[in-house]
């Protein structure tokens, strides 16, 4: 965990010894120094003790990893590219817990070779929210079906596989499905 203990301590004009004395129970300046430098792991307990000693919230002592922002240079409309009227940025996507990906090896349907399809896993109670969306469905023996979820009857899912002339497939009682939520496409 990356912390801002040193920055906050210095901003408050306190020494290592003063922070160590203010901790409940008191500790040593050496311990505070090790926690600041990252040579000792900062637990939640230590974070709370030091935050109280510094008179700040524990969240003020945690540095989140930098996420780059990309400035928006233009807005693409039907009439062409236009300059934005106000400053805007986009943040590159990052994976969330419970996600899986589908790598497209050969073009099929709307997808091209090289595409990555990021999918959010859903439990059976969430299947209805994925209607009319592309989904990945596990099948027996380690196989999968990827297609548009077009209906649900009880524990049976009706999918339309990608590609021309594909026939509807029915999958009974899958333990989970993964709804396509993001397409990452190299140009």
Image: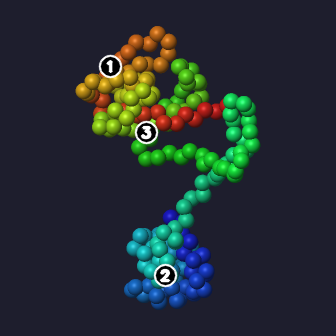
* Residue placed most toward the observer, 171 or 114: 171
- The residues bearing labels 3 and 1 have C-alpha atoms spaced at a distance of 21 Å
| Residues packed near mark 3 inside 10 Å, few (<14), some (14 to 19) or many (20 plus) | some
Q: Which residue is mark 1?
A: 170
- The residues bearing labels 1 and 2 have C-alpha atoms spaced at a distance of 60 Å
Q: Which residue is mark 3?
A: 120
Q: Earlier in the sequence, mark 1 or mark 2?
A: 2
As drawn, is 87 to the left or to the right of 180? right
As drawn, is 72 to the left or to the right of 179? right
Dot 3 lies on which element? strand
- The residues bearing labels 3 and 2 have C-alpha atoms spaced at a distance of 40 Å
Disc 3 and disc 2 in contact, CB within 8 angstroms: no
Tell me what residue is drawn at x 59 percent, y 28 percent. Answer: 114
Tell me what residue is drawn at x 53 percent, y 19 percent. Answer: 108
Residue 174 locus on image (x, y percent): 30, 29
Give above or below for 73 relative to 170. below
Q: Is residue 57 visible?
A: yes
In which quarter of the view is residue 83 placed?
top right
Q: Earlier in the sequence, mark 3 or mark 1?
A: 3
In which quarter of the view is residue 67 placed?
bottom right
Query: Residue 10, labelled with which disc?
Result: none
Q: Earlier in the sequence, mark 3 or mark 2?
A: 2
Disc 1 and disc 2 in contact, CB within 8 angstroms: no
As drawn, is 180 to the left or to the right of 14? left
Q: Which residue is mark 2?
A: 55
């Amino acid at each position: 965990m990356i912390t801002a203990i040193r920055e906050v301590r210095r901003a408050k004009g306190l020494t290592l010894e003063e922070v160590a004395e203010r901790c409940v129970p008191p500790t040593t300046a050496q311990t505070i120094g090790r926690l600041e430098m990252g040579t000792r792991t900062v637990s939640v307990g230590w974070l709370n003790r030091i935050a109280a000693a510094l008179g700040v919230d524990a969240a003020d002592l945690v540095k989140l990893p930098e996420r780059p922002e990309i400035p928006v240079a233009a807005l693409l409309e039907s009439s062409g590219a236009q300059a934005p009227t106000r400053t805007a940025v986009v943040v590159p996507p990052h994976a969330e817990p419970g996600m899986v990906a589908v790598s497209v090896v050969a073009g099929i349907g709307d997808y091209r070779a090289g595409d990555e399809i990021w999918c959010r896993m859903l439990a059976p109670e969430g299947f209805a929210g994925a209607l009319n969306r592309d989904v990945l469905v596990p099948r027996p023996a380690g196989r999968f079906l990827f297609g548009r979820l077009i209906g649900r009857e009880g524990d049976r899912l009706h999918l339309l596989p990608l590609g021309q002339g594909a026939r509807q497939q029915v999958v009974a009682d899958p333990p989970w499905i993964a709804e396509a939520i993001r397409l990452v496409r190299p140009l």
